[in-house]
Image (cartoon, rainbow, N blue to C red):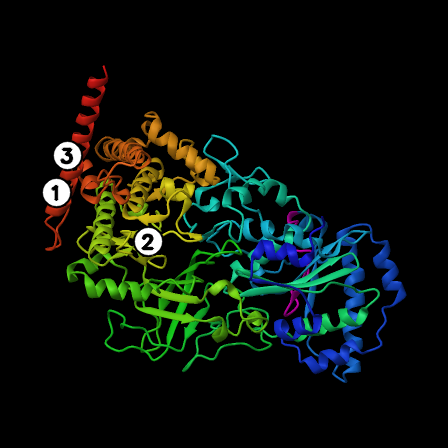
Amino acid sequence: MVRTFADTLTQEFGLHQHTDLDLLTFANNIWGLDATIGQRILEMDLTLESADLDRYEKANSQVALHGPYKALTEKLLSDVLRNLQEPVDTPKDVIWSQEDISPTETESYEHVSNLVHLWTPIPTNEHPDWAVVKHLVEMKHNKKPTGPSFFKHFKASSLYLQRDNQTAEPRRCKYLPRRLVPASCEGIVTTRTGKKRTIEEAGIGDVDEDWDSDSELEPPVKKRARLDKIVRNRYAQVALNAVECLAATSRFHVSGLLVDQWNVTPWVIGLNDVVCASSFCFDSDPAKLALVLYAMNKCDRLHAGFDPRLQARASEAAPKPNAGRMGPVDSVIGSYFEYDKPASTPEESENTIPPMTCFKVTGVIRRPDALFGRGTAVYRVVRRLSSGSFSDAPSVLKLSWPLERFPPENEILAHLKSALPKKSFAYLPGLFFSVTFTPDELNLPWKNLSDRNHGGRVLRGLASPYYNKLWEAGSIENFKKAWLDCLEFHYLAFKIGEVLHRDLSENNLMVLQCPDGTVNGILNDWDMAEFVDATVNGVAVTDHHIGTPAFMAFDLLYGAAKVHYFRHDLESFFYILVWAAFHYNMEARTKDEVPHEQVAKWLGTKEDIVASKRQLMEDNDVVDHVKEEWKGVLEEWIKPLRALLSNAKHDGTGDKVGGVEGYDDSTYGGRLSFTRFVGAIKVKPRTWGIFDFKAEKQAEKGADMARMREEMARLAQDSDSD
């Protein structure tokens, strides 16, 4: 049975999509076109010149379509302006195409969208940056137009083909879609072009998106298994280019057209949402194309999806969001984020707090790399002082789209500070600014289309001091100190604060360099944390599987766990330790660019990761390949922890399956607890002036005695049967 346009998107995006929307309604809500003017355009008697149509018809390739298309659309837009009695020479969008550059340049630029609408012209033979693209136009040369079949592969194209998460500001906007499955056992992740991928490019450092269960979407293993097939789909580039536009700057959505020979489909893609107007054939209905061209031309910066709080220049007084015809910033680096809200604490060198908060962007730490999930962007910034100058101390601004139902990170941190001893605050991020925007406050274009939009997500901004990565700790001893600080604070937050972090990764364990040369570990990124449910001693696992796959606990990754327990986060600490031993060069303060062959599959599908972690637990040879400088950590920490985890998982699962009375799944029957974990590495945990660990040790002793009695009873029963 042929799937309809609406059926396809309903399955792919669930409730967060709108298909076959009336064209005028689309233009009004998405591009801000006055509905009265739109209706006038639809009623105009417009024609396309036969010569242009003939040239378009005879075009023998996609690039050959560009010239005729540009000619007929420019004339059509001029006709509309004349009919509306508007100046024909009014500022118009500039349509850039691959025809505008030399053949050699075109070849090297093959992954860019066929056509893009720009705010202003650019010099001949120069490439437009993704940051300033206003609209995308994807053209397909197809004598038999397929129309809405573009969306038959939309999900895979848009959700799971992700961009290289580069930190440099791009000038040449080439795109290589991410391949998540290592192509060999050589420790290399490759793209479909055969280009070798580094760890950072493969996304291991920054994967923090929610995993939706198959209640709305297919499980990740199915999505990724089809990746090679999907990237060959002729319409995938629409979504890939949308990701590039969203990643190049601070942008909420991007819109454009799919022109499949004669068939036109207007669309808008944002994080977690897609809206599509009904398709039409422009040769038989030029008034609809005229409406689209006029609306796209009149579309201002806000309706084009650009964040109005990102400015090219800092405001003198209150921020003035740029939502007008003026184009976006050319580069996010060197630009300014401005918020009409003061910070919560002053800069260390100051006693006053400016009434508005302004950040100058000095670098990009992370860009959004997919169209589904939190869409996290992280910028290195400096904050403006009361004097108007900018601080010398670097900070970090994080923008993301978490589910609104999750407690805001600033509230989690405030709760922990109210519940925990003051001396523990040194291991929390020093958050000094937070802000939340709802879709209504952002005036997102699809908010009026129905009461179910944007997946229940909100935009949250958080700022804190800049901290170093784990591999920048400077020495093995500093790494161990930072790792232990985070481990012990994590237990304190769980036991006393009743909060479970749930998203531990190598990028969430940070390092603060102290003036005396020592380091503190900073447990960062609490935006996925939740309060512990005392009835289950953990957090119930919902449709959204939270965590970074490479560091997720085995049974959470596999989908067997119904509750996220503290022991799952202990397992994540272990995987972070193992990953570090394979990749970190502590004296050089660097990490290897490509994943080691022994753990390369941690970057792969769910099945790959599960198989690799199972091998890690069962094969003694795996961990023997760690770096030479980590051999001491291997013997003192990694091997004892591996034995603890492996035995606890094996024996605990046996007790659970066997229905052992009093079995506590939250600790594998007392086998995997905080005290067991630190005991395995012979570390005496700090008490924080609170713990004596007597209750924990008594519980562990009781569990050991119960198992001993059960074993003795079994042996006695076996003896009697003999």
The residue under label 2 is which amino acid type?
A: Val
Q: Give the range drawn in magenta.
A: 108-124
Q: Distance between the residues labelled 1 and 2?
A: 25 Å
Q: Which SS class for mark 3?
A: helix
Residue 539: give its label.
2
Between 304 and 618, which is closer to the camera in this rendering? 618
Q: Do the residues labelled 3 and 2 touch (CB within 8 Å)?
A: no
Please state if 443 lies on the left or on the right of 26 as rendered.
left
Q: What element carries label 1?
A: helix
Q: Position of residue 172 (x, y in %)?
A: 58, 54
As measured in the structure, the alpha-carbon distance from the residue carrying label 3 to the one carrying label 2 is 29 Å
Left or right, residue 661 beside residue 286: left
* Rendering quarter of residue 616: top left
Could you tell me the amino acid type at mark 1?
Gln
**Residue 340 seen in the figure:** yes
Q: Residue at x 53, y 51 (%)?
A: 217
Residue 260 position, x and y percent, is: 75, 56
**In front of the other: label 3 or label 1?**
3
Residue at the image position 72 percent from the left and 81 percent from the top: 37
Callouts 1 and 2 close, C-beta under 8 Å: no
Disc sitting over residue 705 in the figure: 3
Q: Residue 698 carries which label?
A: 1
Label 1 crowd (10 A; few <14 / some 14-19 / many >=20): few
**Tag 3: amino acid:** Met
Q: Which residue is drawn at 43% across and 62% down?
A: 403
